């Protein structure tokens, strides 16, 4: 598993290096925006049996509050 992670990270580094070396601001901003897109919310919370447990943001907040309190 560790070797797979290292290989994956090395590939990511090579892609990032290629974008930087291309000296193309448009490519850089597209890369950054792609990495930032869709990360503003928490996904569905899944129970131990694999079923979707909570999808409403209010219910998720209450569940996390209860868990971490």
Image (cartoon, helix red, strand yellow):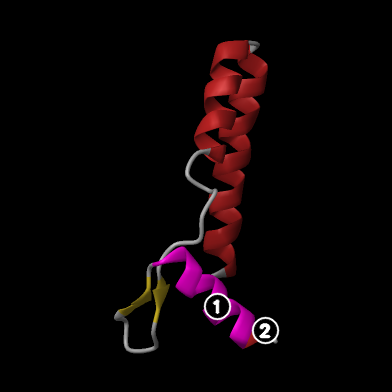
Q: Which residue is painted at 54% across and 38% down in the image?
A: 35
Label placed on residue 46: none
Q: Secondary structure at mark 1?
A: helix
Q: Which mark sits nearer the N-terminus, 2 or 1?
A: 1
- Kindly tell me whether residue 66 is visible in this rendering: yes
Name the residue rendered at 39%, 88% in the picture. Answer: 48
Q: How many numbered marks have been drawn onto this rendered protein structure?
A: 2
The residue that appears at 54% across and 17% down in the rendered structure is 27
The quadrant of the image that shows the C terminus is bottom right
In the picture, the disc for residue 68 is 2
Horizontally, residue 19 falls left or right of residue 41, namely: right
Residue 5 x/y as whole percent:
56, 60
Residue 45, position as x, y percentages in the image: 43, 73
Q: In the picture, residue 25 is in which quadrant? A: top right
Label 1 neighbourhood size at 10 Å, few (<14), some (14-19), many (20+)?
few
| Residue 66 picture quarter | bottom right
Instruction: Check if residue 65 falls in the magenta segment.
Output: yes
**Is residue 27 in the magenta section?**
no
Crowding near the residue tagged with mark 2, few <14, some 14–19, many ≥20 C-alpha atoms within 10 Å? few
* Of 35 and 46, the residue lying toward us: 46
User: Looking at the image, which residue sits at the far front?
Assistant: 58
Magenta region, main secondary structure? helix
Question: In front: mark 2 or mark 1?
Answer: 1
Magenta extent: 56-66
For image coordinates 32% across by 89% down, the residue present is 49
Give SS at disc 2. helix
The residue labelled by disc 1 is: 62
Q: Residue furthest right?
A: 69
Asked whether the beta carbons under mark 2 and mark 1 sit within 8 Å of each other, the answer is no
- Residue 62, relative to residue 38: is it above or below? below
- Residue 4, given in percent of the width and then of the height, sits at 52, 61
Depicted 5 relative to depicted 38: above or below: below
């Amino acid at each position: 598993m560790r070797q797979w992670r290292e290989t994956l990270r090395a590939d990511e580094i090579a892609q990032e290096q290629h974008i930087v070396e291309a000296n193309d601001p448009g490519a850089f901003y597209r890369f950054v925006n792609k990495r930032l897109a869709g990360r503003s919310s928490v996904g569905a919370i899944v129970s131990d049996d694999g079923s979707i447990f909570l999808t409403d943001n209010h219910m998720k907040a209450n569940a996390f509050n209860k868990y971490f309190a």
